[in-house]
Image (cartoon, grey):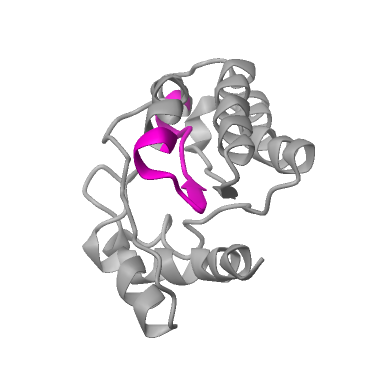
Amino acid sequence: MLQTRLEEQGYEHRVVNASISGETTEGGASRIESAIETFAPDLIILELGGNDGLRGFPPDRMKGNLSKIIGSSTASGASVVLLGIRIPPNYGQRYIDAFESVFRELAAEHDVPWIEFFMEGIALNEELMQGDGIHPNAAAQPVLLDNAWPMISTALAN
């Protein structure tokens, strides 16, 4: 869908999905250098951390991993758009606050644009979620693209 949107808007970029289902920020941090070398991206859309949160990993560890990914990306000349994530309320307010603040802090520290919650309008809509109540379904994909598009198009224009 992103590739189609780019083409419709006149961009000549090629979309590469380098994600791995179930990956944590540690996995992303260990793979970022290879991905940059392989694909030489102009823009990296970074959406990682949900699996860290669901596993109760320390937010500081997640932040360090995401910081490495952002730092490696920007050092290569790629722009970064950071997509913020929220986790279910059963993790407790203290953990949720620490988890969600990671994205805000990273955006400020690395001066990268971010979307506070890219699943806005999706997460609480059962029709747009898979049976697990955590992952968006196929019908949610156009909404996810619309949520992220303003930041993506701005990053590509710069």
Q: Residue at x 26, y 68 (%)?
A: 139
Q: Is residue 116 above or below residue 48?
A: below
Give the vertical position of 127 relative to 37 (above or below): below
Q: Is residue 46 magenta?
A: yes
Residue 140 as seen in the image, left or right of residue 25: left
Q: Which residues are magenta?
A: 36-52
Q: Quadrant of the C terminus?
A: bottom right
Q: Position of residue 44 (x, y in %)?
A: 49, 48
Q: For residue 97, which quarter of the picture?
A: top right
Residue 151's x, y, as percent? 59, 64
Count of numbered marks: 0
Q: Which of these two is toward me, 156 or 46?
A: 156
Residue 70 in the image, given as x and y percentages of width and height: 60, 35
Residue at 64% over, 18% down? 60
**Which of 111/38 is in front?**
38
Q: Nearer the viewer, residue 47 or 140?
A: 47
Left/right of residue 20 with respect to residue 12 in the rendered view: left
Res. 11 image quadrant: bottom left
| Residue 68 is inside the magenta segment | no
Residue at image location 35% in from the left, 78% down from the top: 7
> Is residue 138 among what the camera can see?
yes
Q: Quadrant of the N terminus?
A: bottom left
Q: Is residue 38 left or right of residue 72?
A: left
